[in-house]
Image: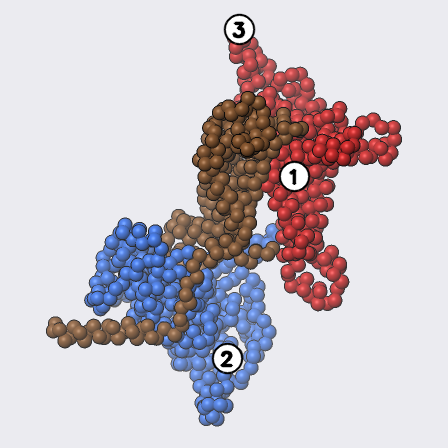
Chain colours: A brown, B red, C blue
Amino acid sequence: MSGLEETKENDVSKQASKHIKETIVESIPPPIKFRALKRFYANRAATISVVFLVALIVLCYFPNLITDFSQNEQTAFKRLPPNSTNWLGTDLLGRDILTELLYAGQITLRIAIAVGIISTFIGSLAGAIAGYFHKIIDSLLMRVTDLFLVVPQLVILALALKKFGDEYIAMVLIISLISWMFTARLVRAQVLSLKSREFIDAAKMNGRSSIYIVFRHLIPNSWSVIAVSSAFTIAGAILLESTVSFLGFGVQAPLTSWGRMLYDFKGFAIGQYFYLFLSPALATFFTVLAFNFISDGLRDAFDPRSEQS
Amino acid sequence: MGVTIYALRRLIASLILLIIASFLVFGGVRTIFDPTARLSKNKDVQARERERVRLGLDKPLIVQYKNWMSGVIKGDFGREDIGSEQVADKLKKGFSKTFELALWGALVAACFGITFGIVAAIRRNRPIDYAVTAFSYFGIAVPTFAFAYVLMNMFALWLPNYFGSSEPWLFTTATTQGSFARGYDGLWSLASISDYIRHMLMPIMVLSVQLIASWSRYQRASMVEALQSDYIRTAHAKGMSKYRVYTRHALRNSQVPMVTVMALDIGLLFQGLIITEFVFSIPGLGKVFTDALSVGDATTIAGWTLVTATFVILANLIADLLLPVVDPRIRTT
Amino acid sequence: MSGVNIEGVNSESLDSILRIDDLHKTFVTRSRGRKISTYALRGVSFSIKQGEAVGIVGESGCGKSTLARLIAGLETSTRGSMSFNNMPMRFTKALRKKISMVFQDPYASLNPRMSTASCVREPMHLLSKEELKVKLDKIYEEKPEEEWTTIPRGFLKRFFLKFESKRALAEKTYASRLLELVQLRPEWSVRYPHEFSGGQRQRIGIARALATSPDLLILDEPVSALDVSVQAGIISLLAKLQEENELAMLFISHDLRVVKHICDRVIVMYLGQIMEDASSELLFSRPRHPYTKALIASIPKAKLHERTKGYKAEKQENVHVGSEIPVRVLKGEIPSPTNPPQGCPFRTRCEKATDECLQKPPLAKMTDGRLIACHFPY
């Protein structure tokens, strides 16, 4: 092949590609990056919640950033009201409440986030499979959900903890086991609506397996639902943990969580030492609130239609 | 005809659900709690075995369940494992206290929840809507027991102290004889009614705060959806009065999802009862449960769960039967 | 094709790529405890030759889409047989490679969470290593120095690019080439469906359908969801692709004008049955079946002539669509497919209907080669 011909060929191919580029009548709009993220940040409550939670997690794992004390350290010889050294006061044994609160927060957050991950995993998988196969597995899932609705969550949790209660790992597993149904129901509904879309037909036509369709098509398209429900599940897990610990069936000493602190300070709940009880209660409240705000913020960010309803 | 068949089918499905749930709970508590465990250190090696035979624990689980269930049908829930009281009596005693509280709680929650939701939906994006939304966030996020203690401090200590009144404004029932109404002469006298309210108000508030929050949220959402639909616009365009549009069209249509939501939350009500009775030391069903759980009384817990599960299922059954009435589109098949 | 001389098989069936015989499809739904049967297809038979474009037209609810889904293997038939290349159809990988489909709604047929390249690559797992290599060699032969791989946006994706298998890279190259074939820019392969317009998405859908070099392409109303201005582009692209690749096409549409433009042969369906089956030319110039006549008569005609073409053009147009047909809109509604009329399905709306129409007319061959199911085909 001579050089001339080569250049000619080059010209032809270049011309061809130039021609293609010119024949495209429809222009393509510039990509909109991070649409959902931008909408999320427009939501003030959700943004503040994220900042709050990040700060909380950092402080819980590095308490020395704001306190000079270590866990179980006796800093005073009596109960102190909030003051400049002990910002939230001290308890009966003279331990700094703020330090105790942050260490207890580690356990609470660890339980809650672990529950969030496990139950989201189980829930989205079960929901996707039930929604996709829709017949036997689906009715099975629905019956199981019914069963769990019949007996209050708190009762199941308290009963189960009575048996396995010493380990907080057991607590994580049990709370996960009773809270995955919420995610499963939401994901199932999402999958049912996705299933009739044509890209699923296209995948089936192309001989893709059911597993491929579930993992490549259905679950990625349910991310918004999964994110929303996982934040909501975490909020529920914190409340459930604190309630069951407060009733005395949850986290056992020497481990402490916010619920366990509330149980310990129950005797001071009425009267002048109320601040002892108030700190873990407020910590629980604000954390749960933050997760709820994030959940709603995510929902609005992914689905702008629901923003105002 | 169709409605009867529909009702029958729902009833049978509910019964099956109840049997499965009660079996699972019975099996669960039987394996979790061993009432003979305290005899394990007894010098008499045979004592534990004798106790097991006496309680019928040596038989297979399904036989135990059958025996228990045949007693339950006759109203005999068995004797508690630790102690000598009949479980049925304990439940009956607790129930009379709980029923009063639960009824008030559900009623208050329904009234306030639905009203808040409707008002917020009609006055959407106005201050009152924001207030309702803020309240619902509060109710969903607050640990109810902590809320109870805040209330107690506020109404029994701080506020009366601040205003210099001699006795607390509201009673935490823990500080009285543990009964709601002290013996007043006239049942309907002003004094007895105000006393009743002063004793009941805080437990009711604690019991209903979560339900009000969640129900007002659902009511608001479904009402907003109803208000945005085309038939509402048509009704407005026809010149129908606003009041009529809201009551006749929007409210009626927004009640359909509420029926299901409220029935499902009856389980949540029992959860709230456990906490409320624990905090206020009310000797009701919730207290029966927490006491039984702390001593590990399997028979009582099994009976308790069966009774509460029956109520939850009953509530859902009523909702299922009510749904075709509220929403004619739902086919009774 | 192997085994040319099989006894008992006439020459017409031999070169047919798809052959459908007496196909029935009944959907059974339950309502109020009763079973309700919807008869979507009631005895449909036809065949498609290699490289032939067959159009299927009819009102909505006549079973066009069900037919497409049956051939695509998305539903199973109640009765009847389908054969592909003279083999009974079994939806194995080998067969899925030969048949592909373009869907109606370009917004629903592409997964919004998958990049264009991933969408187009979806059927490529059906291709063997050798087949893919042949395709790649062809691409490099045609355009040796063209840059086919596009660096994806996003730090993580760029990082994982290092770990991609040779197969994945080859598939990506092929996907880019396919995008070019449907007149999209190869470098757009890293973009996501929501960044494209409807027409561009449909082009992606076509690229995906062409990935396995199918013999039969099913098009289920491929342009009905698009703007008219975009439709023309897609139609001419399809026509070009069909010509270049000798594709057999099954083009389903309710728009007769589109079908007329692209198809060699047109099948008119009504209530799950074939009414008329004729070459495009014959059908549009001399429709015989009353239903076909009515359908053609109801094509809205743009009055271009008044401003641009003048009187002559109008006359020509009328001749073109068939001047002997009185322009009339069909009366009445299409009967419910749950309870189709006895005999000829069209008799309830047909002006020629007599008692004879209570007997079902067979799909008979006429002297000019068309098939028609009517007792009074004149």
**Alpha carbons under labels 2 and 3: distance apart:** 101 Å
As drawn, the residue found furthest toward the bottom would be: C311
The quadrant of the image that shows the N terminus of chain A is bottom left
Please, which chain is the residue tagged with disc 1 on?
B
Q: Position of residue A57 (x, y in %)?
A: 47, 39
The residue at 49%/90% (across/down) is C307
- Alpha carbon separation for disc pair 1 and 3: 48 Å
- In the visual, does C272 lie left or right of B121? left
**First reached walking from the N terminus: tag 1 or tag 3:** 3
Disc 3 marks a residue whose amino acid type is Lys
Mark 1, residue position:
B266
**Quadrant position of the C terminus of chain A in the picture:** bottom right
The residue singled out by tag 3 in the image is B43
Q: Please tell me which residue is depicted at 37% across the width and 75% down the height of the picture.
A: C236
Pointer 2 and pointer 1: residues touching (CB < 8 Å)? Answer: no
Q: Do the dots labelled 1 and 3 sit on one chain?
A: yes
- Residue B31 shows in this picture: yes
Residue B58 image point, x, y percent: 54, 18
Residue type beneath disc 1 = Ile
Q: Which residue is mark 2?
A: C299
